[in-house]
Amino acid sequence: GQQLNQSPQSMFIQEGEDVSMNCTSSSIFNTWLWYKQDPGEGPVLLIALYKAGELTSNGRLTAQFGITRKDSFLNISASIPSDVGIYFCAGFDYKLSFGAGTTVTVRA
Amino acid sequence: DSGVTQTPKHLITATGQRVTLRCSPRSGDLSVYWYQQSLDQGLQFLIQYYNGEERAKGNILERFSAQQFPDLHSELNLSSLELGDSALYFCASSVATSGGRTGELFFGEGSRLTVL
């Protein structure tokens, strides 16, 4: 089955920093998506990408669908405390397959 | 609030028992997906239903079964429970254009199952 490799596994952010994370796959996907999960909640869709090479923004979030259709990245600009949580990449063909997640924590 | 409702939110039971988790999708959504989230396995796709029919199957154990009813709510049945079945179980729904090919899923808050 498909395997999505998401990195980094975890990161610490300082308010105001730009951060990025990425996801690679052994398989081609027609759709790449990024979700965020807060503690005690279900994942929430942040950005969906439907076309290879597509660059899409949602507020301070920017994501790109890789040209090879096997990768995607997510950037968060000017981090704020509420950006903490777990970010998941996901690839969709007939089902949604998730990466292992990137845990974002505020640096003390 | 995603509009997807899951009950119960928490469930504690013993090994060997059977439980049923219930999901009401967003109004108008025809597709329902079930996912299992555990610490060591991440979010694992179990099964998808579209308008009452099974559409796709993932890593769902034979001890687990699901169905989607005419009113579009879905139930996930877990039987002969083992310690390793302890996890968060999420239901998600989607608008699902023909064939359900959007990937834009709306998740409920999950049902946390603890098997002792």
Image (spheres, coloured by chain):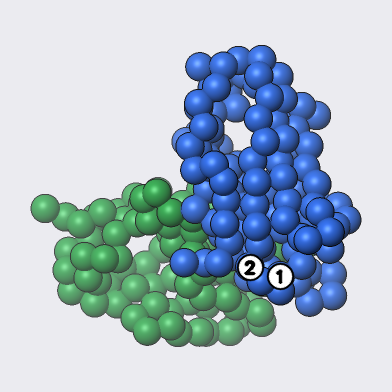
Chain colours: A green, B blue
In the picture, the disc for residue B26 is: 2
Q: Residue at x 16, y 55 (%)?
A: A107
Q: Is any atom of residue A3 visible in this view? A: no
Along the line of sight, which residue is nearer the eye, A8 or B69?
B69
Q: Residue furthest left?
A: A108
Q: Which residue is mark 1?
A: B29
What secondary structure is found at the residue carrying circle 2?
loop
Circle 2 crowding by C-alpha within 10 Å: few under 14, some 14–19, many from 20: many
Residue A82: % across, % down: 26, 66
Nearest the viewer among A7 and B35 is B35
Secondary structure, mark 1, is: loop
Q: Residue B19: which disc?
A: none
Q: Residue at horizontal 55%, vertical 67%?
A: B3
Q: Can you give x and y, in whole percent of width and height, for residue A58 in the image?
A: 43, 83
Residue A37 appears in view: yes
Viewer-side residue, B1 vs B60: B1
Q: CA distance from mark 2 to mark 1?
A: 6 Å
Q: Quadrant of residue A60?
A: bottom left
Which x, y percent locates residue B67? Answer: 80, 47
At a point 65% along the width and 52% down the height, the residue shown is B23
Q: Are marks 2 and 1 in contact (CB under 8 Å)?
A: yes
The kind of residue tagged 2 is: Arg
Q: Is residue B48 above or below residue A92?
A: above
Tag 1: Cα neighbours inside 10 Å, few (<14), some, or many (≥20)?
many
Q: Horizontal placement of B62 versus A58: left or right? A: right
Q: Position of residue B81 (x, y in %)?
A: 65, 21
Residue at 81% x, 54% y: name it.
B69
Apparent side of residue B84 relative to residue A84 in the rendered image (left or right): right
Q: Chain of mark 2?
A: B
